[in-house]
Structures are given as C-alpha cells and as structure tokens.
Amino acid sequence: MSSAEQTPETVPGAPAKRPGRLTAAAALCGVQAVALFAGGLFMLVSGLTGDPESTSQAETGGVTLIALGLIPLLAARGLLLRRGWSRGPAIITQIMALPVAWTLLRASGALIPAGILLALVAVTALVLLLDPRTTEALGIRGRA
C-alpha cells in the first residue's frame, strides 16, 4: 500500500481513533458537571438573596457543588484527550452519584424523575467507562 492510500488508522505511530463509547462517557461527565454548576449557582444565588431558611448553608452548599462540578468537568476533558488518569475521577463521580440518585428516588414529587435520570446517567457512564475498548483507548493496561 502506498503512503497516499494509507488512512490515519493504518499509518504507523498515528493515534488511533477515539471510540464512540469514550466520547459518550465524556459527554455524560460533561452533562453532570453542568448540572452540578447549575445546582451550585442556584443554591448560591438563593443564599445571597435570602430565600432559604439558612443563607450560610445555602451559600456553602452552592460553593461546594460548584467545586464538585470541577471533577467531572476535568474528567470529561481528560477522556476526550484520551488521558488514562481521567477514568478514575470519572468512575468516582458515577459512584458518588448513585447514593444521590437513591436519595432522590426516595423523595417525592419532581425529585423522583430527577433520581431516575441521575441513576440512568451514572449507570450508563459506568458501563461505558468500564468497557474494555474504553480502557484500551485510554492506554490503561491490566496487571500482567
């Protein structure tokens, strides 16, 4: 095969194409980051305007959610760039989301669909992150 006929996948030393599963996992982490930022901003604004019973709790909770939103955001960026370190924070984020989803499922009203959605996103992301093709694309090797 001549060099003009070679595709990027067949050129020695060229990076392999990012699997769709990896891109999907990064997208789910990004969605979680946006949701954490939005929830944090809502709590922060509520605390600053004095709507909740405890403004200091709302402000602290808002800042905490915004800070926690950085974890899946950085993980999503790392997954898109195919960095092996990014899978750990992404998996931890999903594991942390499951008890939150369970708590929302045990609540009432509009929180139940939110819990269902969060559980579906977390489980889907875990399946995508633990897929052997994702592990291989990130360059993570098992023990020999």
Image (tube, rainbow, N blue to C red):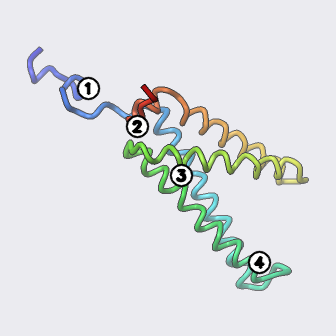
Task: Give the position of the C terminus as an image quadrant.
Answer: top left
Label 3 CA crowd tier, 10 Å (few <14, some 14–19, many 20+): many
Give the x, y percent position of residue 133: 46, 27
Q: Earlier in the sequence, mark 2 or mark 3?
A: 3
What kind of residue is marked 3? Gly
User: Which residue is pictured at 60% across the width and 68% down the height?
Assistant: 66
Task: Give the position of the N terminus as an image quadrant.
Answer: top left
What kind of residue is marked 1? Glu
Label 4 CA crowd tier, 10 Å (few <14, some 14–19, many 20+): some
Task: Kindly indicate whether the residue at mark 2 contacts the one at mark 1 (C-beta within 8 angstroms).
Answer: no
**Mark 2 to mark 3 CA distance (whole Å):** 18 Å
What kind of residue is marked 2? Leu
Location of residue 77 with respect to 56 vertically, above or below: above
Q: Between residues 48 and 122, which one lies in front from this camera angle?
A: 122
Residue for badge 4: 57
Is label 4 in a helix, a strand or a loop? helix
Residue 138 - label: 2
**Mark 4 to mark 1 CA distance (whole Å):** 53 Å
**Mark 1 to mark 2 CA distance (whole Å):** 16 Å
**Mark 3 to mark 1 CA distance (whole Å):** 27 Å
Residue for badge 3: 30
Q: Earlier in the sequence, mark 3 or mark 1?
A: 1
**Mark 2 to mark 4 CA distance (whole Å):** 39 Å
Give the x, y percent position of residue 31: 58, 51
What kind of residue is marked 4? Gln
Residue 9 - label: 1
Q: Nearer the viewer, mark 3 or mark 4?
A: 4
In the shown orientation, is residue 98 left or right of residue 31? right
User: Which residue is pictured at 45% across the width and 29% down the height?
Assistant: 143
Count of number-bearing discs = 4
Task: Kindly indicate whether the residue at mark 3 contacts the one at mark 2 (C-beta within 8 angstroms).
Answer: no
